[in-house]
Image (cartoon, rainbow, N blue to C red):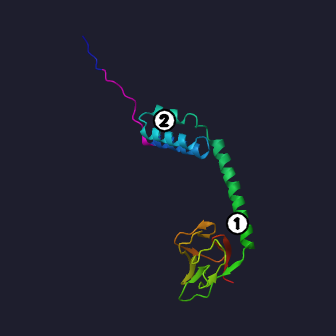
């Protein structure tokens, strides 16, 4: 009598790489508008609790494509969109009024609606004490002072302080200027 030992076989454990790939496919599907927010959240939860590869395959089956053409198309659309934004910013930048850097001194230039500020901007979107511009050596620092409608440099909102240069576009609320040293 011969005896054979048979061991039950279990499916291979799901690897982190497989899970990460599935999560990436789900993120891409949501970004492309193929999944609603609720569907995306539910599938992400299921992907994070999945134990086998076939469970992940079910979650991403309707989203996976070769991807080459769609990636190329999305990249082309992204470049075209970025070009129009850069073109609009360049067009507006040359037409903006200049804001001359002040003569460096011991005190920063306060900007806002309050008459006591060094630069008074009478606009409803500008806070009473909105921002300040100060020289530190040969560099200029723009600091938002907790304004309601924000301070932006080159289209990006300032939180705290940021280094500014000649030619930068700055906005206080909805008032915009181009910084200039002359």
Q: Main secondary structure of the magenta part?
A: loop
Q: Are marks 2 and 1 in contact (CB under 8 Å)?
A: no
Q: In what element is the residue under mark 2?
A: helix
Q: Is residue 10 magenta?
A: yes
Q: Nearer the viewer, residue 169 or 22?
A: 169
Give the vertical position of 144 relative to 51 (above or below): below
Q: Which residue is mark 2?
A: 56
Figure quadrant of the N terminus: top left
Secondary structure found at label 1: helix
Task: Give, as a single range, the part of the protein colored magenta.
Answer: 6-16
Q: Which residue is mark 1?
A: 89
* Residue at 56% from the left image edge and 79% from the top image edge: 132
Of labels 2 and 1, earlier in sequence is 2
The x, y position of residue 50, in whole percent, is: 43, 36
Residue 141 at x, y = what percent?
Answer: 55, 78
* Position of the C terminus by quadrant: bottom right
Q: How many marks?
A: 2
Compared across the picture, whether 48 is left or right of 5 comes to right
How far across and down, in percent of the image, does residue 119 sit?
Answer: 63, 83
């Amino acid at each position: 009598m011969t005896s054979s030992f048979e061991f039950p076989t279990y499916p291979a454990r799901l690897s982190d790489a497989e899970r990460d790939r599935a999560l990436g496919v789900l993120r891409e599907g949501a970004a492309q508008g193929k999944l609603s927010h609720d569907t995306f959240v539910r599938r992400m939860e299921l992907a994070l609790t999945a134990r086998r590869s076939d469970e992940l395959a079910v979650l991403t089956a309707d989203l996976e494509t070769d991807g080459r053409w769609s990636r190329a198309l999305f990249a082309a659309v992204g470049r075209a969109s970025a070009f129009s934004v850069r073109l609009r910013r360049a067009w507006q930048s040359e037409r903006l009024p200049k804001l001359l850097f002040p003569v460096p001194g011991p005190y920063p230039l306060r900007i806002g609606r309050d008459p006591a500020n060094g630069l008074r901007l009478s606009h409803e979107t500008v806070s009473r004490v909105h921002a300040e511009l100060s020289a530190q050596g040969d560099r200029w620092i723009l600091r938002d002072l907790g304004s309601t409608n924000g301070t932006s440099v080159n289209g990006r909102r300032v939180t705290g302080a940021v280094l500014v240069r000649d030619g930068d576009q700055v906005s206080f609320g909805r008032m915009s200027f181009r910084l200039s040293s002359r």
